Structure formats: structure tokens, C-alpha cells
Image (cartoon, grey):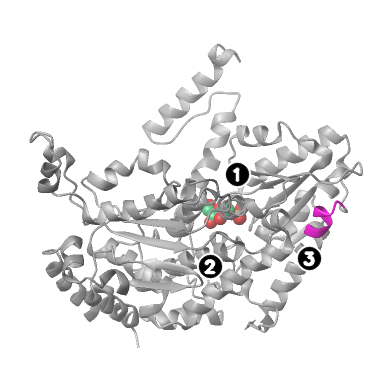
Amino acid sequence: MTALPLRQRSAWLALEAHRNTLRATNLRTLFAEDPKRGQRLRAEAEGIHLDYSKQRVTDETVRLLVELAKESGLGERRDQMFRGEHINVSEDRAVLHVALRMPKSASLVVDGVDVVDEVHAVLDQMSSFATRVREGEWKGHTGKAIRNVVNIGIGGSDLGPVMAYEALRYYSRRDLTFHFVSNVDSTDLVEALRDLRADETLFIISSKTFGTLETLTNATSARRWLIEQLGDESAIAKHFVAVSTNAEKVAAFGIDPENMFVFWDWVGGRYSMESAIGLSTMLAIGPERYFELLDGFHAMDEHFRTAPFNENLPVLMGLLALWNRDFLGSASVGVMPYEQYLKRLPAYLQQLTMESNGKHVTLDGSTVDYDTGALYWGEPGTNGQHSFYQMIHQGTTVIPVDLIGFAKSLNALGEHHDILSSNVFAQAQALAFGKTADEVRAEGTPEHVVPHRVMEGNRPTNVLLAEVLTPRLLGSLVALYEHSVFTQGAIWGIDSFDQWGVELGKVLAVAIIPELESETEPSLAHDSSTNELITLYRRLKRNEDTHGN
Ligand code: F6P
């Protein structure tokens, strides 16, 4: 049965009416009227506890949101993903990152092939390579062991690896250094290589397509650097490996297919951190811990696949995000990990959420008449508190926030961790309940300052709390966000797995490159602004006085 257009579904209409009644209340009142709210509006899966009692919802909101998920066919779409159907319609592809973390004993036959067997064959290849490098058995061109690993990739071929490396640094080998080069800005590569010895350095060229300009430009310069340092082209064989779906292009670049780790077109770039794209992660933490990471992903996948919607952590997170976006009008979500090791999680989630759900048409190509994906951003706590939290507390825009905390630090030191964690709880409290004018006055505040110190509160948060950051926990946390994104995309009826919006800029850049490089003055046929900017750039570039060049 085809669902009605989203805004005509009965649950959507009921949610609109319900939202209008909720406008008359706020979180202060909701908590005062219902002392058990904090005990009730929570859920847990795989050691991740979600407190959503400080969202602007009631039991009725959650009930209606769950209805909306059902009416929108979320369960069926989820099952289609797990069955390997081509739910990425605009690219006619299966979406099977869940197969990347299935145990060896599982089986998932897609188009006549057991993809779990394929996944584990690559995991075995990665494990044996990682072990050889970590044990010093893999020798560089001059017979030295590898001490430095440089991952060159961008987007999903960078953000997952760098986020996971930072997140799991506590578990990583400290006698190996890891570097992540993504930007085509030469400074990124030059600074990464500045202190490295070529004969101890391994480059992982990570690119699903092996056609991404930034990555190929960096890889070409890295190859030149290595050959210049070692004086021998054959050195590439011991210092370059590739992770890709495109064997021909890898071979054309000059990397031996023996040194290639494959993945498949059914793995989206932003869903690839636990495919062979995770090779740098495995080199850092070792195969055993890497398998713990996969187990964490898989456990959350199973929870998503089987738990009833009203107890299903990713479904609830997705529904709450949709509620904030479409019914309360919040265009932005802050993600604040109170765990220094998760400092790159917001950047990782930015690609996951915004490249997936920043879409303007539904699966059948009709323009949506509701808002889709929000802007995701964030910084580790407590740094954000001394910077942009002011606006979250008192600005004119309501910004829902995910606060992510842990009960234990991996580096316990005096009272640091309790101080850190107290901020998680205090921020959620302050955002929800604020401070009234009477409370401000009661503190003896002069009347003219009172309005400045009033905090209206009623600002929604999710608090995610877990015991301690482990590889397994990280896997579950990332899978939680992945499936929350899926939930939202399924209800919006969009293709969360393509990214056509990034193409136009790439094509235009390729046309402009020769105009910037040309020795002779090019005849420019762009709009007047672009023509002027290119002309100015060329003039400034010729100005040899600038920066003493
Ligand atoms: O430009 C966007 C994008 O296609 C992302 O979706 C992807 O993660 C990134 O580029 C890198 O692509 P590749 O791994 O093919 O180099």
C-alpha cells in the first residue's frame, strides 16, 4: 500500500494539531505536572542510555510520532535495506553497510552472491596486513619497518578514519604515527609529511571511486615525494596501498592490485568507516579491537531491526529529530560530545546527516513541501560552553542539542571527570528550565539587569550517557546515528544514499582550473562576478611582492 503524501497522513495531521496544543505549555510545567517524566521518557540499547524527557514532547507526541513512522512504512523500508534491495533509487544500488558488520557465521545473499563471505574475505586480508605492519614484518623499500601511516582520502574516505582514529586513540599503538590528509590545499599534505621519513611511511590511498580530484592530486604528490626521497619508482610497491571499489583505476595509478583492499558499490562513502576504508583504524587499534568495533555496530543494527519502535533507540532519535525539524521549526542541531576523544564526531556526523538528508525531492522526484535534514555541527564540551552556548541559551533561534557523556574517563585524573560530567547534566537542566525574572530578582539582581539574565528555557536536549568509550561502544554510537538518519529519510520519503548536490560545483571547478593556470589571459565567459574574481585572482597571483614569494 502506497502511503499518502507526508503532510496528508493522519498521524502528521494529528501531530500538527497536537503541536498547537503543546505550545501552551513548556518543559517546566511538563516536569512539574509529571514527577515521573524523567523516569519514563528514556530508552536504552547497547549500553547507550537516552534521556529524551527534556525534549518538547509528551507521551502523546511519541505515540503519534511512532504512528507516523508506521504510516510511512518505516519498518518495510528498513527490511528492504536489510534484504539488499535497491533502496538507493537514483543510483539504483543496494544500501548494505549493515552487511559490513555481520558476523562471519551470518549470510546475506544479494544477486546470487553471499556478501558476508566477501566482507570477511577482505577483513581477513586487512587483518593479516595490519598484523604484518604492526609486528614490523612488513618492510619498506629499504628494509625498515613502518612507523608512519598516512591516509589520503576525503569525505567518507577521510572523516570516518580520522574520527575513529581520534576516538580510539586510547587503544592505539603509540609507536605508530597516523596522519590524515584530505584537503587539496597543499599545506595539508606538506605539513603532514614535513617530519616523516619516506622509508618508514605507508600511504593508504582511500577512495571509493578512485576518481576524486582532491585525493588523486594528493596521492600523486605523495607518490612524487616518496620517489624523490627514495630515488626509486619501485618503492611504491612497499609504501602505497589502496582502498577502493575501482580496481582498474587503482592499477592505472600504479598501485599493485595485490596491495588493494576492496569494498563495494553498495557501501556509501559516508557509511564506509567499517569497510576496508577502516584500514587505518585497524592498523591503529589492531584486528581484535577492530572486530569489537564491528560487533558494536552489529548489535545496534540488530536492535534497530528488531526492537518495537517505541523502544527503538535509533527510531526514537530519528523521530525526535523530525519533530524538532518539521513541527518545532529547528533548522540546526548541536552535537556536543563531553569526551575529548570524540572531538571529530561532530564533523563526521555532519557528512552522515547532511549529505544523507539534505534533499529537496522525494524518491519519485516530486519536490518536498516540508523541511528535510537539519544543519549538524558541534564541538567537544566544555569548550563550546565558553563560546557559542550563549546563543543556544538565550538566542532567538531554538537549537536542539545532543549532549553525549560517559560515566568514566579513560584517563582519570583527580576530579576532572566529575567536573566535566556535571556540565552535561547542568547544561541540559539550564536549557530546559532556564531562569524566570522572579528567580533572577530573588538573587538581588538590579531591575535593569533582570531581563538580560532571564533565560526562557524550554530548549530541547537529548542526553546520551554510556559507561566508557570503547571500540564496541563507538560502533553502537555511530550505528545509532546512521539509523536515526535512516528513520528520518524514510519518513521524508527521500533518497538518503545519493549526493547529487555535490556534483555541479565539481564540474564547474574543473572548467575553471585551466583558466587559473593558463599562461596567457583566458577569455572568460562566466557570469560577471565569476569573471571578475578570476581576473582578480590572476592579478594577485602575479603580484610577486605578496608574502615575499
Ligand atoms: O563529493 C562527495 C563524495 O562523493 C562523498 O560522498 C564521498 O564520501 C567523497 O566524495 C569521497 O569520494 P571517494 O571515496 O570516491 O573519493
Q: CA distance from mark 1 to mark 2?
A: 26 Å
Q: Secondary structure at mark 3?
A: helix
Label 3 close to label 2 by CB (< 8 Å): no
Residue 13 lies in the magenta stretch: no
Alpha carbon distance from label 1 to label 3: 25 Å
Using a 10 Å C-alpha cutoff, classify the residue at mark 3 as few (fewer than 14 neighbours), some (14 to 19) or many (20 or more).
Answer: some
Q: Mark 1 or mark 2, which has the lower sequence index?
A: 1
* Up/down of 250 relative to 45, above or below: above
Name the dominant secondary structure of the magenta segment: helix
* Nearest-to-viewer mark from 3 and 2: 2
For this rendering, which residue is in front, 412 or 7?
Answer: 412
Instruction: Please state which amino acid type lies under the numbered disc 3.
Output: Gln
- Comparing 112 with 97, the one in front is 97
Q: Is residue 461 visible?
A: yes
Q: Nearer the viewer, mark 1 or mark 3?
A: 3
The quadrant holding residue 292 is bottom right
Q: Specify whether 137 is left or right of 519.
A: right
- The quarter of the rendered structure image containing the C terminus is top right
* Three-letter amino acid code of the residue under disc 1: Ser
Asked if marks 1 and 3 touch (Cβ < 8 Å), the reply is: no
**Element under label 2?**
helix
| Direction bottom: furthest residue | 1
User: What stretch of residues is rendered in magenta?
Assistant: 130-136
Amino acid at circle 2: Ser
Query: Which numbered dot is residue 125?
Result: 3
Which residue is denoted by mark 1 in the rendering?
A: 182
The numbered dot on residue 476 is: 2
Q: Residue at x 83, y 60 (%)?
A: 258
User: Is 178 on the left-hand or right-hand side of 326?
Assistant: right
Residue at the front extreme, as displayed: 414
Up the image or down, 222 lies above or below 78; here it is: above
